[in-house]
Image: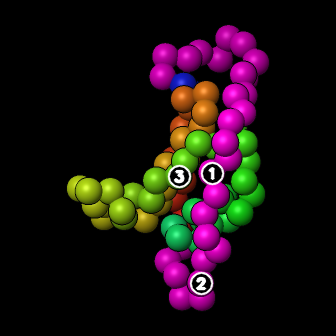
Amino acid sequence: MADGEKHEHAEQPVSDTPFSAPAPEPGDAADVWLAGAIGAAECPEIARVERWATRPEGSSQAGLTVFHHNNSRNFVRPL
């Protein structure tokens, strides 16, 4: 859900330029595979994907954040 949004109404998807990513290579980390799979779908509701490992401050956990054009986000971690 977007910041401040409540479960009071149906989701309002917003479409725009879809996020795309290169296909992962054998031996790539799980978060690279997840970003590649999401990017291969080229969903017009997804604006971008941020891998936690590539953040300037880094991260001790593997995962990513999926940002949608309607300002909602998904937090995804490989198991």
The answer to whether 50 is drawn above or below residue 69 in the figure is below
Measured Cα–Cα span from mark 3 to mark 2: 18 Å
Helix, strand or loop under label 3: strand
Residue for badge 3: 49
Residue for badge 2: 25
Magenta highlight range:
3-30
Name the image colouring.
rainbow
Horizontal and vertical percent position of residue 33: 59, 71
Instruction: Give the side of residue 53 with respect to residue 79, left or right.
Output: left
Q: Nearer the viewer, mark 3 or mark 1?
A: 1
State the residue lying farthest toward the front.
17
- The mark nearer the N terminus, 2 or 1, is 1
The disc label shown at residue 19, or none:
1
**Residue at 72% from the left image edge and 33% from the top image edge:** 15
| Marks 3 and 2 close (CB-CB < 8 Å) | no
Q: Check disc 3: other Cα within 10 Å, few if <14, some if 14-19, many if 20+.
A: many
Q: Check disc 1: other Cα within 10 Å, few if <14, some if 14-19, many if 20+.
A: many
Helix, strand or loop under label 2: loop
Measured Cα–Cα span from mark 3 to mark 1: 7 Å
Q: Verify whether residue 25 appears in magenta.
A: yes
Horizontal and vertical percent position of residue 3: 48, 22
- The mark nearer the N terminus, 3 or 1, is 1
**Residue at 30% from the left image edge and 64% from the top image edge:** 60
**Residue at 72% from the left image edge and 22% from the top image edge:** 12
Q: Please indicate, yes or no, whether residue 61 appears anywhere in the rendered image.
A: no
Q: Quadrant of the N terminus?
A: top right
| Marks 3 and 1 close (CB-CB < 8 Å) | yes
Of 21 and 29, nearer the camera is 21
